[in-house]
Amino acid sequence: MVLPLLTQQPAPVTRRDLAISMRFLGVAQAALEAMFLGLRAETDRVLGQGAPARYGKAYPYGYCREITQDVLARLKQRLPHSDCSGLRAVHAFLAAGGEGRCVWGILRGRYFQTALQFGALYVDVANDTVIASKPKVEILPMAEAGLETVRDVWHFAGIAEGYWDMRIYANHALPALAPLLPMIGVTSGMEVCLQSATDYMVGLFCQDGFCRSEDWLTRGPRPPTGLVEALRSQCPAELLSSNREAGAEAAIAACRSARAQGLASSEPWLRARVADHARLHAEAEIRVCQARSPSASSRHTGNSCGSMTAPPGPRSGPTPGEPMSTLTLDGRAFEIESLPDTAKAQIMGIRFVDGEITRLQAQLAAMQTARTAYVEALRAALPAA
């Protein structure tokens, strides 16, 4: 029995895919790369401004999904105009019956990657989100890309531990979410999250009625008691009320109950659980942001929370993070120690303001994430049409 493709699952390449890919895209690969680089530059200007660091590293590290989705959205907007050779090639490929889709999986056995698949071509527009020195865009035949699907929780956990430096446990803390989100992830920085609400993983767990989830919850590593308590303490009151009991038995029972009720095919239930995850994640991000906000004393030294990139474009004044021994302004270099006290006071003022800007950008990003989560929760709570 051939199962239908899951959302974001890489598609097998047929002979027809190969033929039309070579006819329309293979001959235009240089133009395609130039087009995608242009779209990626637009994406960076939007997403890179004020993007919080992930796993202790600055944008674009860890932003593979967001970058890819943004580039794809921009591509869709431009296609009707087809004002460059790269766009014309994609338009002709699609008109001939080719398919372009967003895919996700494990790349070369090392890390998770979101990319685009156009027939027989693999297009990675976020190629630098793990190793920043790599080219931003990579285009390869799918057969050479090394992108494989995630088979089960064990497969996911093995990659997550190496890629994210994240220890993965069974989700015995919030049983009502365990069928769809059976994993608790803990980073080396002790940040806790549930895994994984990606479209593919949600589809994978639903595919067999949460049997994969139940297997992990039964045989996977049990979370330490302190971890369970920490995660439950992060929950909004209404979410905790639907998870009154913790433990392996409750989580396994939740899988069996969800299977018996056919919830794997219930869109309202799935949306509600994903919204629960988003709310939990948003509240955690707000706490992390607040914990990393600089104290009053550190702000006056010009130190920032270290989780933001500087906004692009020209700036007046010293470069944030520039060593305090020298200052470059308008192309002129100065030894700070030789400057008058009035100039030194202005430098400290600029650095203080830069630190405040960084702090506020971090809070804004966290609030935007929280707002999205609350909108999803509202949508799930509204009566069905």
Image (cartoon, rainbow, N blue to C red):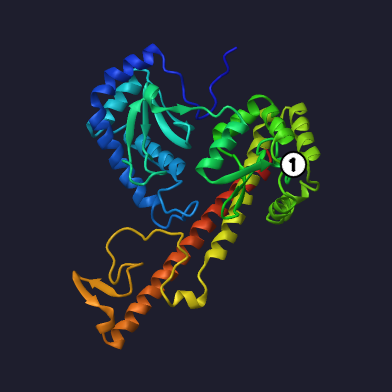
- The percent position of residue 189, horizontal first and vertical second, equals 56, 55
Question: In the current view of this chain or complex, which residue is farthest to the left?
Answer: 331
Which image quarter: residue 290?
A: bottom right
- Dot 1: few (<14), some (14–19), or many (≥20) neighbours within 10 Å? many
Number of marks: 1
Kind of residue sitting beneath label 1: Pro
Mark 1 lies on a secondary structure that is: helix
Looking at the image, is 21 positioned above or below residue 33? above
Quarter of the figure with residue 289: bottom right
Q: Position of residue 375 (x, y in %)?
A: 59, 49
Let me know if residue 379 appears in the view: no
Q: Which residue is nearer to you in this view: 14 or 249?
A: 249
Q: Quadrant of the N terminus?
A: top right
* Residue under the point 44% across and 78% down: 300
**Picture residue at 42% right of the left edge, 54% below the top:** 58
Circle 1 sits on which residue? 175
- Determine if residue 148 is in view: yes
Q: Residue at (72%, 33%) from the top-left corner?
A: 219
Q: Residue at x 29, y 18 (%)?
A: 22
Q: Position of residue 385 (x, y in %)?
A: 65, 36
